[in-house]
Amino acid sequence: MTFKHGQSPHKCRTRLYRIWTMMRYRCRNKKNHLYCLRGIKVCKQWEDFIIFARWSMKNGYNDDLQIDRIDNDGNYKPSNCRFVIPRKNAQNRSDFKGGYLNKYGTYCLSIKFHREAIYLGSYSTLEESRKIYFKAADMAEKGIRPTRSNINV
């Protein structure tokens, strides 16, 4: 079997081809409550791997990045997708809580930086906790160690 895009269905698949395949699978798997059952789809033009691959290369794809939907409730389409580092992608998950709710009713927050867990404090609201987390994650991405004292809300 010959593929017009030069990608193999077996051993020679590229990472980008696997990303494209899994993106389509997540949206079509009727048991997947995070994608299919929420109505998330892949746009028609991206059903063609060549078009998806061209868009990816023009929009910063490299093997260290993951595809991310900017609006987590939106579809996979050029205007709603980007390539980001795994940490940034994890922040955009629909199940990201912004810390955990402890027995006192506050959100305890920590972040990993170079394999070290850094406690960022306890916050009374989820919104406040998320705001602090995203600021700390941006600092960590720039190589700055986030601490409670250098994160000013």
Image (spheres, grey):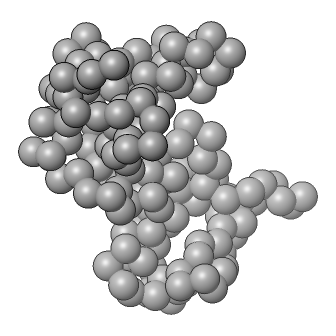
Image position of 28 (left or right of 123) = left
Which one is nearer the viewer's eye here, 123 or 16? Answer: 16
Q: Vertically, is 94 above or below 130?
A: above
Residue found at the far right of this picture: 103
Q: Nearer the viewer, residue 31 or 113?
A: 31
Location of residue 141 by image quarter: bottom left
Name the residue: 66% across, 81% down: 117
Residue 50: quadrant of the picture:
top left
Q: Position of residue 12 (x, y in %)?
A: 38, 44
75 shown above or below 93: above
Residue at 64 percent of width and 48 percent of height: 97
Note whether residue 149 is visible. yes
In the shown orientation, is residue 127 left or right of residue 1?
right
Q: Is residue 61 left or right of residue 132?
A: left
Q: Residue furthest front?
A: 1
**Is residue 118 at all visible to an observer of this figure?**
no
Q: Position of residue 84 (x, y in %)?
A: 33, 55
Q: Quadrant of residue 137?
A: bottom left
* In front of the other: 66 or 15: 15
